[in-house]
Amino acid sequence: WLCPITLFCLIYDCDSTHRIVANVVPLQPCTACDMSGRGKKRTRSSDEEAPFDGDDTEFLNIKDEPDDKVVVAEGESGRITLRAKTKLAENKAKLAESKAKRAENKVRRVSGVMDSIADCWLCPITLELPIDPVTAEDGKIYERSAIEQWLRDHNTSPSTNSPIGPRLFPAPQAKATIEALVKSGAVADDKATAWKAKLADQEELRKLREAADGGEGQAMNELGICYAQGELGLTQDYMQARSWYEAAAAKNNLAAIVNYGWYLLNGQGGSINIGLGMYFTTLGAVKGKLTAMETLGRGFQFAYYGLPMDLAKAKYWYEKVINHPDCKNYRKTRVTENLEYLALQADDEA
């Protein structure tokens, strides 16, 4: 498909090339591409410029207008007039612009294809590219945490609604492909940004778990929070949260002591244990934890958690909350409302 005249026109812009050099060399029709590219007649839009990949010498013999007498230089190729020099500069500028446009269009086409390929790997549940892709028994690729949570409540495929079992299989090829697509920069920004954010969460989770496994109480409590709230890509799991809170409480982590006490009082992630729950809650309240103090206030106000109704003690703990330097406005507003209701209760008793 090489053009026998220009030797560089393969399938693009053959007609444009002919127009550029038409005043330089007597031309014969291009039999290979019929001066149109790909063997078909090609129409160029009015704003599309002609490319030129030759050297400058061909432009030096551009015919001068009869009245163009301004000579810039003389050379073996003949006179170089100001008009010819200007024309040469214009052609070079048009060539650069045309090349830039073609490069941009090529990148856009390739990006579109790559983005379409990335769509094939979207998790049907999250509608995002998975960080930890697995293949379910329906043959579909899912984010592990998403399909695990789905299978806890369903025995059907989220894609086909057909019955499936609980087995999940790692999908390392899918993972490698997704990573390569994102790193290539060809994936749409919204998909890539979400994937990179999840990748950062995964790395943070890895470090957190490493610290928790190493016996750090703070890391244990934070890992419990992640399980409780389904953060860092984890499936929400109150049993796991309770387990980590318990482990952190054993390390005397104050926040974990309060969290574990609340789980025991309310039976979250396990059975209710009022006695042990009140022990940890009271311990947290005495050490100044606002959540524990508010829990005791509500317990004495409404006779919760096996406590007797004692409005004086409820008022004591509520006031401790309000006067605490770390008490935020939202909590202060809530406790103030409880105190107002407490006053009404006292009036009714009186």
Image (tube, rainbow, N blue to C red):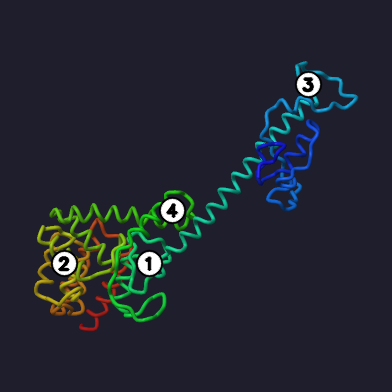
Question: Which residue position holds label 4?
Answer: 181
Q: Tags 1 and 2 in contact by the CB under 8 Å rule? A: no
Among the 4 quarters of the image, the one containing residue 307? bottom left
Among the 4 quarters of the image, the one containing residue 146? bottom left
- Front label number (3 vs 2): 3
* Earlier sequence position, callout 2 versus callout 4: 4
Using residue 131 as the reference point, say whether residue 90 is left or right of it. right
Q: Measure the alpha-carbon separation of dots 4 and 3.
A: 52 Å
Instruction: Tell me which amino acid carries mark 4.
Output: Leu
Q: Tags 3 and 2 in contact by the CB under 8 Å rule? A: no
- Name the image quarter holding the N terminus: top right
Question: Which residue position holds label 1?
Answer: 141
Instruction: Tell me which amino acid carries mark 2.
Output: Ser
| Secondary element at tag 3 | strand
Percent x, y of residue 240: 20, 67
| Secondary element at tag 1 | strand
Is residue 16 depicted above or below 277 in this figure?
Answer: above
Q: Measure the alpha-carbon separation of dots 1 and 2.
A: 31 Å
Q: Residues within 10 Å of mark 4 (few under 14, many from 20)?
A: some
Q: Measure the alpha-carbon separation of dots 2 and 4.
A: 38 Å
Q: Tags 4 and 3 in contact by the CB under 8 Å rule? A: no
Question: Which residue position holds label 2?
Answer: 243
Using residue 234 as the reference point, say whether residue 248 is left or right of it. left
Q: Tags 2 and 4 in contact by the CB under 8 Å rule? A: no
Q: Residues within 10 Å of mark 2 (few under 14, many from 20)?
A: some
- Name the image quarter holding the C terminus: bottom left
| Secondary element at tag 2 | helix
Question: Which residue position holds label 3?
Answer: 80
Instruction: Tell me which amino acid carries mark 3.
Output: Ile
Residue displayed at 27% across by 79% down:
344
